[in-house]
């Protein structure tokens, strides 16, 4: 069983129906640790050794956050800047994260249609996430397709529930090593694995 670390960052968590629902769906799963960064570090003073110890204890790292300005909230960037140190996460001797899996769970107010070459945002979500992909690659991690919820502000109760069930299913499949890694090269979002198995 793989151990999964959810690095959750949302500066306005109390206002986010989708993220509350997603976290609620996985909070009691065996082998899953939720690390709420804004709750833990409201002053942005990150305990680097503690975060590195957490990373060492887990096999799958999930950056879970809203899609702010085509990226992540500031605390995710601060966490990456400080925790993923040269000599620890990358560089000749930086092999602490080698072989671990990394992915993102993001919520976006925009529809999928606007995230395309033809859409008003001109790029896909995965193109916007390229810095995270490359950061994971530099750390010798395997970067997986993201779990993405589009149109999050307009979701009804049934849709919220369905996304939460899908997220839980993805986390369970990753934890239990029940996803064929070859599939990652043929899908845009990891959500598609659940849709294909429905």
Image (cartoon, grey):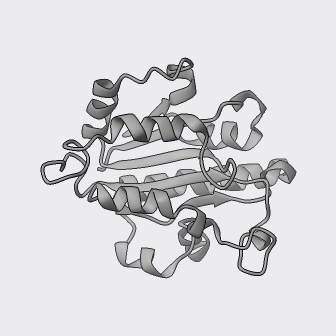
Is residue 183 at least partly visible in the picture?
yes
Q: Nearer the viewer, residue 165 or 129?
A: 129
Q: Residue furthest top?
A: 43
Q: Quadrant of residue 196?
A: bottom right
Q: Is residue 130 left or right of residue 121?
A: left
- Can residue 30 be spotted in the picture? no
Give the residue drawn at x 78%, y 55%.
159
Of residues 65 and 177, the one nearer the viewer is 65
User: Residue at 55% across / 45% down in the picture?
Assistant: 64
Number of labels in the image equals 0
Which image quarter: residue 182?
bottom left
Direction from residue 47 to residue 76 in the image, left or right: right
Indicate the position of residue 144 as horizontal and vertical percent values. 43, 64
Q: Is residue 124 above or below residue 44?
A: below
Q: Nearer the viewer, residue 78 or 182?
A: 78
Q: Residue at x 48, y 59 (%)?
A: 131
Rendered location of residue 157, percent (x, y): 82, 47
Name which residue lies at 37% across and 52% down.
175
Locate residue 154 relative to residue 54 in the image: left or right.
right
Above or below, comparing residue 162 to residue 18 in the picture: below
Find residue 139 and report its horizontal and vertical position in percent.
Answer: 29, 54
Across and down, in percent, residue 123 comes to: 67, 72
Dividing the image into 4 quarters, which one contains the C terminus? bottom right
């Amino acid at each position: 069983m793989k151990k999964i670390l959810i690095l959750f960052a949302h500066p306005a968590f109390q206002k986010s129906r989708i993220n509350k629902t997603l976290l609620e769906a996985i909070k009691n799963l065996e082998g899953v640790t939720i690390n709420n960064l804004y709750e833990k570090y409201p002053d942005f003073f990150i305990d680097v050794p503690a975060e590195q110890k957490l990373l060492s204890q887990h096999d799958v790292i999930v950056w879970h956050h809203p899609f702010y300005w085509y990226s992540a909230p500031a605390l995710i960037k601060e966490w990456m800047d400080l925790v993923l140190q040269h000599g620890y996460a990358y560089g000749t001797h930086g092999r602490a994260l080698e072989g671990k899996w990394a992915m993102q769970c993001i919520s976006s107010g925009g529809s999928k249609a606007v995230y395309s070459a033809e859409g008003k945002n001109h790029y896909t979500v995965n193109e916007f996430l390229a810095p995270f992909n490359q950061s994971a690659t530099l750390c010798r991690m395997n970067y997986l397709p993201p779990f993405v919820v589009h149109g999050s502000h307009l979701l009804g109760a049934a849709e919220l529930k369905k996304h939460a069930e899908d997220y839980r299913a993805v986390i369970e499949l990753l934890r239990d090593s029940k996803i064929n890694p070859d599939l990652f090269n043929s899908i845009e979002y990891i959500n598609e694995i659940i849709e294909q198995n429905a």
